Amino acid sequence: MLGKGVVGGGGGTKAPKPSFVSYVRPEEIHTNEKEVTEKEVTLHLLPGEQLLCEASTVLKYVQEDSCQHGVYGRLVCTDFKIAFLGDDESALDNDETQFKNKVIGENDITLHCVDQIYGVFDEKKKTLFGQLKKYPEKLIIHCKDLRVFHFCLRYTKEEEVKRIVSGIIHHTQAPKLLKRLFLFSYATAAQNNAAADPKNHTVMFDTLKDWCWELERTKGNMKYKAVSVNEGYKVCERLPAYFVVPTPLAEEDVQRFQGHGIPIWCWSCHNGSALLKMSALPKEQDDGILQIQKSFLDGIYKTIHRPPYEIVKTEDLSGNFLPLQEIQTAYSKFKQLFLIDNSTEFWDTDIKWFSLLESSSWLDIIRRCLKKAIEITECMEAQNMNILLLEENASDLCCLISSLVQVMMDPHYRTRIGFQSLVQKEWVMGGHCFLDRCNHLRQSDKEEHQRQLSLPLTQSKSSPKRGFFREETDHLIKNLLGKRISKLINSSDELQDNFREFYDSWHSKPTDYHGLLLPHIEGPEIRVWAQRYLRWIPEAQILGGGTVATMSKLLEMMEEVQSLQEKIDERHHSQEAPQAEPPCLLRNSARLSSLFPFALLQRHSSKPVLPTSGWKALGDEEDLAKREDEFVDLGEV
C-alpha cells in the first residue's frame, strides 16, 4: 500500500543493508497517491476550534522507532488538540458510528494532555522548548495518559517543519491567560442545551433546578435542601453557585463562615443515609474565635448526628489517609515505567518490571482508595450511617472518594450520561483545582522543564502527618472540638471485622449489575490494564484483537483444560507416588514477563522475544534481543 511507509528493518532486528537505491522521494510517491485517490481525510473541528498550523508528508510510526513502520499523513495543530490524519484512515469511516461519544480520536492529543516534547537530532534525543535554532528530524510526544507518539519529519518541507514544531511547542508550553483556554471558545460557540431532559442529558449542576432534580432522584429532599446563598459566587469562589446542605442549617451560617465547616451534601442512599463533605475551618488562635467555632461545630454535629436514625462517622482524608505528596511521588515513578521510546529501553525496564511497578506504590494507592470507598459503602449500606468526608479544602481526595462511592452504590452513575454528570458534580462544581493540579496555564517556575506537569504542583499547607481532625491529644482537638465532636472521630480499624464480613458476603453472591457493585481489592487483583499500557504489542491495540488476542484466548482455554485434567489426575492418583510432570503450556516460574500472555511462542531460550514481526524470525533468536531476561519458559505449543 502506498500510504504505508517502511524505513529500515522490523521487529527489533538489525536493518539489512539496502540493495536498491530509489531516486524517488517519499513525498513524491505521497503526492502521486493523492492525485490518484483524490481523497483526503477531513479534520473534524469542535465548535469554536480553529486550525493553527499543519505539515504534510509526516510519517507516524506505528511501532517503536527501531522498527520504523509507519503511515504517511498530515500533522495538524489546533487551539484544542494535535491531530494526525493518516492517508489510509478513510477506510475507517464506517466505524465512526461506534464512537459517537468520542471527543477526540485515536491519533488526537489534546494540548493539555501533552507532558513532554522531544526532538531527535542526528539520532540524539533532546527536550524541546522555547525558540529553536535547529529543527528535529523526528518529533516524540509523551502524553499524560501514558501514550507516546513518534513522528518522522525527514520528508516534510522545511518551512512546514518549522511551523508545526514551533506551533506545537508554543501552544503546549507557553504561559497562557485564563480566557485564552479553548473551553471559553467552545462555550461561546456550542449550543445551550440547558432545557434538555436531565434523564437523557448530562446534568451540569449549574442551576438550582439541577440540584433539586438530583435530590428528588436520590430521595434526599426529605432531609436536605438546595440553597442559592452563593449565587454569583458572592460568599465563596471555592463553592459552586448552588449546592445542598442539611435542612436545619441556616443560610446565614454559610455566609458567616464563608463555606468552611459547612457539611455539603453529595448523595443519599436508599435507606436515608447520606454522603457529605466538609472543608476545615481556619486554624485560629484567638480564644474568642475558637469558642465561636466550637459552638458552630457543635450545632453541625447535632444537625447530622441523629441516633437512632443516623449516626455520623467522619473520615479525615487530610491527616489519616493519603498525603498528596505521596500520591505525586508514586505517580511520577509509575509514569516512567510506560513512557518508553524504544525497544532497548523497554527490555532494560522489563528485566525488573514487576519490582519497579511494586516499588512505585501506585497500585497500592489504587487499592487503598478502593478499600476506603468500600468501607464507606459498608457504613452507609449495612450500618445506616451518615458519612462526613473531611479535607482541608474538600476538593481533592473528597472528589475522588465520593465519586468512587457513588459509582459503586448508584447504577445511574455507571451510565455514560450519569458518569459525565458525576464528574461535573463532584469535580467541576466540587472545586477541584484543575488549573493548579494540571498546570493548564503553564505558569510554573520549575526548572526541570515541567517534568511533573500531570502532577499536583502545590503541596498542602499543613503537614502530611497532621490534619484538622487528628487525634484526641492534638492541640486543636482539645481547644476547639471538645469531647462531643470527638465522638465523630472513629478509627478505621474499629469496623474492620464488619467490613470484611460485608465484603466477603457480597462477593459470595451472584453479581447484580443494577445494584451495589464492589471491586476486588486483594493485592494480586489490582493490576495494570495490559492492553492499554503494554503498548509494544500493536496487535493488542487493534479493535478485535488480531492474532495476539486470538492466541491469548486459546491459551486461556488450554490452561482451563489443563487445570481440569490435573484435578482429574489428582483424584485418580491421590494415593500413588508422584509421577513425572506431563508436558504443559505454562510451567512454574518465579516471574512472568510483563508481555505475558502475549509472548506465546517462546522456545528454550533465556532471551526475550519481540511480539510483533519478531514471531516470523524465531529461527534467528540471536538477533531478537541483546539482553538477558528472566523470561518464563512457556514450553512447546
Image (cartoon, rainbow, N blue to C red):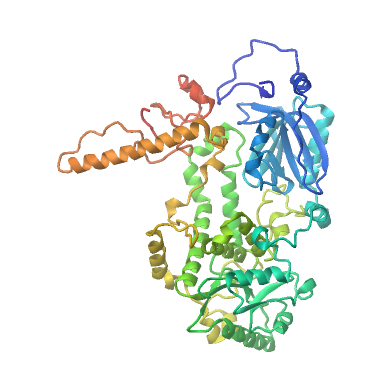
Q: Is 98 displayed left or right of 309 in the figure? A: right
Q: Residue furthest right?
A: 159
Residue 543 shows up from this direction: yes
In the displayed structure, does residue 546 sit left or right of residue 636?
Answer: right
Give residue 98's quadrant in the image: top right
- Residue at left offset 75%, top offset 12%: 23
Which sits in the foreground, 178 or 80? 80
Whether residue 551 is situated above or below residue 368 in the rendered picture: above
Residue nearest the observer in this picture, 273 or 548: 273
Position of the N terminus, as image quadrant, is: top right
Q: Residue furthest left?
A: 575
Q: Identify whether 495 is placed above or below 531.
A: below
Q: Which residue is found at the position 67% from the left and 83% from the top?
A: 285
In the image, residue 280 sits, relative to residue 514, either above or below, namely below
**Quadrant in the rendering for residue 506:** bottom left
Does residue 533 appear in this view?
Answer: no
Q: Position of residue 317 (x, y in %)?
A: 57, 68
Quadrant of the rendering where the C terminus is positioned: top left
Q: Position of residue 192 (x, y in %)?
A: 78, 58
Residue 111 drawn at (x, y percent) = 74, 46
Where 152 sits versus 470, above or below? above
Q: Position of residue 436 (x, y in %)?
A: 71, 59
| Number of numbered discs overlaid on the protein picture | 0
